[in-house]
Amino acid sequence: MTKTGLFDLEKHFAFYGAYHSNPINIFIHMLFVWPILFTTLVLLYFTPSLFPLPQIGGNLVFNLGFIFTLVYSLFYIALDVKAGSLAAALCFLSWVGGSLLANHLGYSLAWKVVLAAQVFCWIGQFIGHGVFEKRAPALLDNLTQAFVMAPFFVLLEALQMFCGYEPYPGFHARVKAKIDSEIKEFRDKKQKKIS
């Protein structure tokens, strides 16, 4: 069953997929996207609590990291219940793990670790785009969608690659046709600029 508007998984996946069609670039993103999410949650651990509730287990705080995790998780489940539930579980594991790591490291060391990890992961992704994809990252055209969809995109890619998963029959064929069309349109525009 296809959805429309904000929950149109085909549209989101085709947009993101048009910027990630090279297998090496996809692999690079599979390696680096979730660590970017994880380290972001490490840093968000240090934001103030949003609710006057006690910490959970002494280390988990209802702060921006929790809200970020909750919003991403609910959005992924709304896009596809099965893969979205797995993505939500990974988001919450990242939140818990990031909170524990942040609490253990303390702010003065955590921000340095996060900075180093983020720089390393982002450089890897830009190399993937520049060297292998030969196309600017999606975040330059749609920042919000690129940041929100990236973790789910690489998870769906991995599920399809290793398990043959499709949110519904024909999903990958329909998305591939849209991706091919968007890539052709991009290349045609690029060629016109060169000419």
Image (cartoon, grey):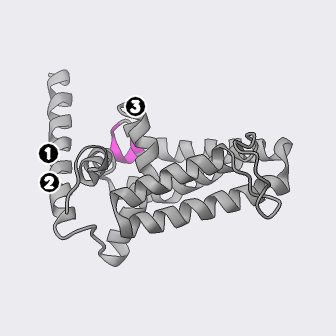
Which residue occupies 78% across, 47% down? 110
Choose the circle earlier in sequence order: 3 or 1. 3
Q: Are marks 1 and 2 in contact (CB under 8 Å)?
A: yes
Q: Main secondary structure of the magenta part?
A: helix
Residue situated furthest front in the rendering: 52
Query: Residue 135 in the image: x percent, y percent?
Result: 33, 38
**Quadrant of the image for the C terminus?**
top left
What residue type is disc 1 on?
A: Ser
From this view, report whether residue 194 is shown above or below residue 54.
above
Residue picked out by circle 2: 177
Between the residue at mark 3 and the residue at mark 1, the CA separation in whole angstroms equals 20 Å
Which label sits on residue 140? 3
Q: Amino acid at mark 2?
A: Ala
Report whether 148 appears left or right of 173: right
Question: For the residue labelled by badge 2, is the local secondary structure a helix, a strand or a loop?
Answer: helix
Q: Is residue 73 visible?
A: yes
Q: Which residues are magenta?
A: 129-135
Identify the residue under disc 1.
181
Callout 1 secondary element: helix
Residue 56 image position (x, y, % from top left) = 76, 61
